[in-house]
Image (cartoon, grey):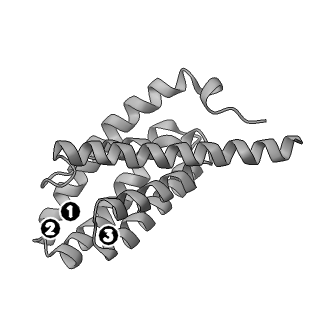
Amino acid sequence: MNKKASNHVLLLVQAAMIAALYVALTYVANLLGIASQAIQVRFSEALTILPYFTPAAIPGLFVGCLLANILTGCAIPDIVFGSAATLVAAFLTRKLRKCKYLAPVPPIAANTLVVPFVLLYAYGVGPLWLSFLTVAIGEVISCGILGMLLLFTLEKYRGKLFLTY
């Protein structure tokens, strides 16, 4: 196998692993009952910092979020717009990779702007201003705190975990 094909396979495998991990972590948060409270904390959202390390995280996070939303019984607008927010956030995180401290900003911003409308129109959860506040708090916990802890931990093993040819 040539070098270019090897790199494509590696990125595909990384994306699939990230997607599977996202789904599994979403299930854990659901089992613990913390993914559907007023302040939603999804362990899987900590993974949104991964585009800092690899472009494979962009499709991996999107597919993982899409599958997690489908498999946990989310409403169609949540599946579509929640997954789209994750895709946009992952792309922007990759673009901002030169500054690791900015890694959690796109997912926090994207979800804080999109999810409250999904909660209102798909699930009838309101008032909208309260959803903006609670989603922001949950995202800061999931992406800002847990995500940055993950980033600092993975940075030590970057060369072994995120190989490229």
Q: Please, which residue is most extreme toward the right here?
A: 2
Q: Residue at x 28, y 42 (%)?
A: 28
Q: Please, which residue is most extreme toward the top here?
A: 156
144 left or right, relative to 164: left
Residue under label 2, please give it.
129
Q: Image quarter for residue 82?
A: bottom left
For the residues carrying marks 1 and 3, which lies nearer the camera in this image? 3
Tell me, for residue 160, which label it has, or none.
none
Alpha carbon of mark 1 to alpha carbon of mark 2: how far? 5 Å
Residue 26 vertical position relative to residue 124 in the rendered view, above or below: above
Q: In which quadrant of the rendered image does the C terminus lie?
A: top right
**Towards the viewer: 73 or 149:** 73
- Percent position (x, y) of residue 26? 32, 48
Residue under label 1, please give it.
132
**Towards the viewer: 8 or 118:** 8
Residue 96 in sight: no
Residue 160 vertical position relative to residue 23 in the rendered view, above or below: above
Amino acid type at mark 1? Phe
71 left or right, relative to 141: right
Tell me, for residue 78, which label it has, or none.
3
Query: Badge 3: how crowded within 10 Å, few (<14), some, or many (20+)?
Result: many
Q: Dot 3: what SS?
A: helix
Alpha carbon of mark 3 to alpha carbon of mark 2: how far? 18 Å
Residue 13 in sight: yes
Q: In which quadrant of the rendered image does the N terminus lie?
A: top right
Q: Dot 1: what SS?
A: helix
Circles 1 and 2, Cβ within 8 Å, touching? The answer is: yes
Q: Residue at x 60, y 42 (%)?
A: 14
Question: Which comes before the other along the chain, label 1 or label 3?
Answer: 3
Circles 1 and 3, Cβ within 8 Å, touching? The answer is: no
Q: Image quarter for residue 67?
A: bottom left
Circles 3 and 2, Cβ within 8 Å, touching? The answer is: no
